[in-house]
Image (cartoon, rainbow, N blue to C red):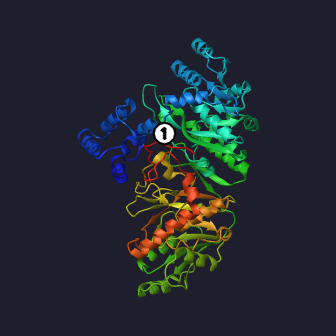
Amino acid sequence: MSVRLRDKLFPEGGKTRIILRRINLFIHGFSPKNIKKFIKSIKNNGWKKTFKTLTNKVRNGTAITPYQVWMQFNDPTEEELEQQRKTKFKLSPKISILVPMYNTPINFFEELVQYLIDQTYSNWELCLEDGSPEKNKEIEEISKRDERIKYNYTGKNLGIAGNTNEALKNATGDYIALLDHDDLLPVNCLYEVVKAINEEPTIEFIYTDEDKITTLDKPRFDPHFKPDFAIDTLRSNNYICHFSVFRKDLMEKLGGERSKYDGAQDYDIIIRMAEIAKNIKHIPKVLYHWRVHKLSTAQAGGNAKPYAFEAGITVLQDHLKRVGLEGEVSHGVTLGTYKIDYKVKGNPKVTILIPNYNEAKTLKTCVDSVLKLTTYQNYEIVIIENNSTEKSIFDYYKEVEKQDKVKVIYYPEKGYNYARIINFGVKNTDGEYIVQLNNDTELITPDWLEKMLGMAQREDVGAVGVKMYYPDETIQHAGAIIGVYGVAGHVFKGLYKTAHGYFARESHIQNLSAVTAACMMAKRSVYEEVDYMNEDFAVAFNDIDFCLKIIKAGKLIIYNPFVELIHYESKSRGAEDTPEKQKRFQGEIDLFYEKWGDYKKMGDPYYNINLKLDSDQYDIKQEKVNCH
């Protein structure tokens, strides 16, 4: 099903968005025959009834979703589970699982306990702290099923953080894990955690992928296949969430959870963990089942715990103070997400480099939008003239150079080599910060330079990219993933600008492996540190290579969707439609593989091995996945 058709059929807003989220995977799995049935149903029955029917089919298992296909290939078999039970690890740490309880439903608790008893790794303990107003005899009896279960009833509701900390006092394990009282750990969960510890004993913190579940007789759904650790992604939302495991000494340094942040107490402790932990491990396997019921955040979104999202603001404000960053924290586009506008320090000069060949009208649209909208004042526009042939463009140069902020410099060589043109521009200008900007773009966001500068000024940041749209208001660029469509691909292409893709990733500030140079900011010193752009990539992949060099140098790439531009895309240079261009393009592909083949082979750390590489929409693989 095309992304544009999906967006027309699934308009934004209110309940529609919630319903869409629940059946999104099913829609991606439509066959052409089912698409026709779906459209016919909307015409005959209306969208509400159609969505309700589809939701029910997904929930009751009569519809086969892509995730259900993934489970058939990737859920452990009985033979694999039996082999896990027989495994003798060199290191067999005890895992203490902390569960704060309050009016816990009996059936949920019984299932939680049984899933733990059935774990294929046995060295664990369950530390329960019950703050319910009345003691429940059934829960007490269930707790007696296994000597590894420590049940403590206080009759005091100390809140989630307080009860968790009370449970922590009874923990004797080498590692501390956090589990909600209504959720489940699949029986292979602790085995996979301990396997990771044996492979890398210095791990201090572990997190996993997760999905959702209603009841045991209904199929699991809505899997969250997460990226590896990414600080800016974490500052945008608590994507780590479940299942989180702390080494005991790390938890002791953190001092447990803090009641000040109840509702976002897990977010707080994970953010504080990220400030001090040296070795954070992501296991790209679904090892946590998040229970969906009428009182859970998973079911009701912001209606269940609105205070939690306000607490998240406080978590981030306090975090920024601790790490010495200044920024304004506000809510993001979707509930439970946040954006940070970092304060610009001083008044550094920004040089905006715009390579250009002919296309006077296109260039004028770009330059006019920058001059008209830009609110930051200490900038210059430097047009790099590259062998234009039309009189109209030189007439435009004479006119536009009357503007104080605009000048034209002339690239001295024949031919087109984008990387070399940019390097020429950087070396012949003096801005402390460089923005590479395509001539076929049009600015939308007035404070774009402030938003990019605030990030680019951070010591840990190498480059900042933006969100770009086609003229029809669908996404052209929301970051790039290494390996998508071979070398690298822009994700969420064609998604309507107000629609949301996989976990609304297109609308989060996040770390990625690469962003497009059609609009990208970096310090001048970064260019010098990585030896500028690689001129062997004359046309394609020079921006991807540049970003990977920045990452290799130890700095981050940030995608900021709150800076928006229209991209008319490649009007000046056109498509790869001649034998000569195709030969050059293949040569650049070969060079990329030669340089970055290992990075691609290992998998983009900001993506997930369970997601397809022949799709730019974060679709789930329909095959056996071999995790590293």
- Mark 1 lies on residue: 223
Structural crowding at the residue carrying mark 1, measured as other residues with C-alpha within 10 Å and reported as few (<14), some (14–19) or many (≥20): some
* Depicted 361 relative to depicted 100: above or below: below
Occupied quadrant, residue 420:
bottom right
Q: Residue 584 placed where, x, y %?
A: 47, 73
Q: Quadrant of the C terminus?
A: top right
Q: Judge by depth and name the residue closer to the eye, 387 or 451.
A: 387
Amino acid type, mark 1: Pro
Residue 447 in view, yes or no:
no
Q: Secondary structure at mark 1?
A: strand
**576 sits to left or right of 136:** left
- State whether residue 38 appears in this view: yes
Q: How many numbered discs sit on the rendered protein?
A: 1
Task: Give x and y (percent) for residue 176.
Answer: 68, 32
As rendered, which of 565 and 536 lies closer to the eye? 536
x and y percent of residue 487 in the render?
49, 60
Q: Position of residue 611 (x, y in %)?
A: 48, 47
Determine the residue positioned at 59% across, 47% down: 228
Instruction: Report the side of 569 relative to 305 (left or right).
Output: left
At horizontal 43% and vertical 41% (from top left) the residue drawn is 21
For residue 313, above or below residue 453: above
Q: Is residue 442 above or below residue 220?
A: below
